[in-house]
Image: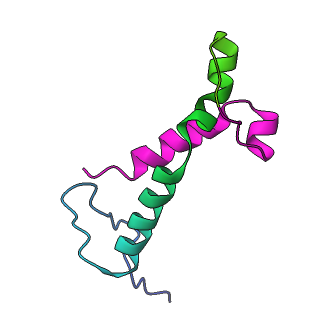
Amino acid sequence: MVHEIVSLNAHAPLRGVELTGGPFLTAFRSNIGYLKGLSLDSILYWFRVKAGLPAPGQPYRGHFEDNIKGQTAGLFLMGAAQNVDR
C-alpha cells in the first residue's frame, strides 16, 4: 500500500506570498539582476532591423537568436513577467 506524503491535490498560492529570505529570495534577486543587466539595444536589434530603423549595438548570438531572430526579446519578456513583484 502506498501512502502519499503530499496530497496530489496540493496547490501553491499565486498571490500574497512574501519572500523574506532563503534560497528563493536569493534566486529571485539573481533573476532580476540578470534581466536588468541585459542590453535593450541587443534585445531589440532584429526588431529594429526588420522595421528599417537604426539598430545600435550588436544582436545577441547563440542558438535562439541564430535560428529565430528576436527570440531573446520573447525570453526577456517571459522572464520579466515571471519575476514581477505582484
> Residue 76 in magenta?
yes
Location of residue 32 (image quadrant) = bottom left
- At 42% from the left and 82% from the top, the residue drawn is 4
Q: Residue pushed farthest left?
A: 16
Q: Which of 55 and 81 is in front in this view?
A: 55
Q: Nearer the viewer, residue 57 or 83?
A: 57
Q: Check the image and report above or below for 32 versus 42.
A: below
Q: Check the image and report above or below for 40 versus 5.
A: above
**Residue 52: horizontal and vertical position, in percent?**
67, 10
Is 38 on the left-hand or right-hand side of 72? left
Q: Nearer the viewer, residue 77 or 17?
A: 77
* Label total for image: 0
Q: Check the image and report above or below for 13 versus 77.
A: below
- At 34% from the left and 81% from the top, the residue drawn is 22
Magenta-highlighted residues: 57-86
**Residue 13: horizontal and vertical position, in percent?**
26, 60
**Residue 15: horizontal and vertical position, in percent?**
22, 55
Is 66 on the left-hand or right-hand side of 54? right
- At 34% from the left and 68% from the top, the residue drawn is 10
Q: Residue pushed farthest top?
A: 52
**Residue 35: horizontal and vertical position, in percent?**
49, 51
Is 7 on the left-hand or right-hand side of 44? left
Q: Check the image and report above or below for 54 versus 19.
A: above
- At 63% from the left and 37% from the top, the residue drawn is 42
- How are the colours assigned in the image? rainbow
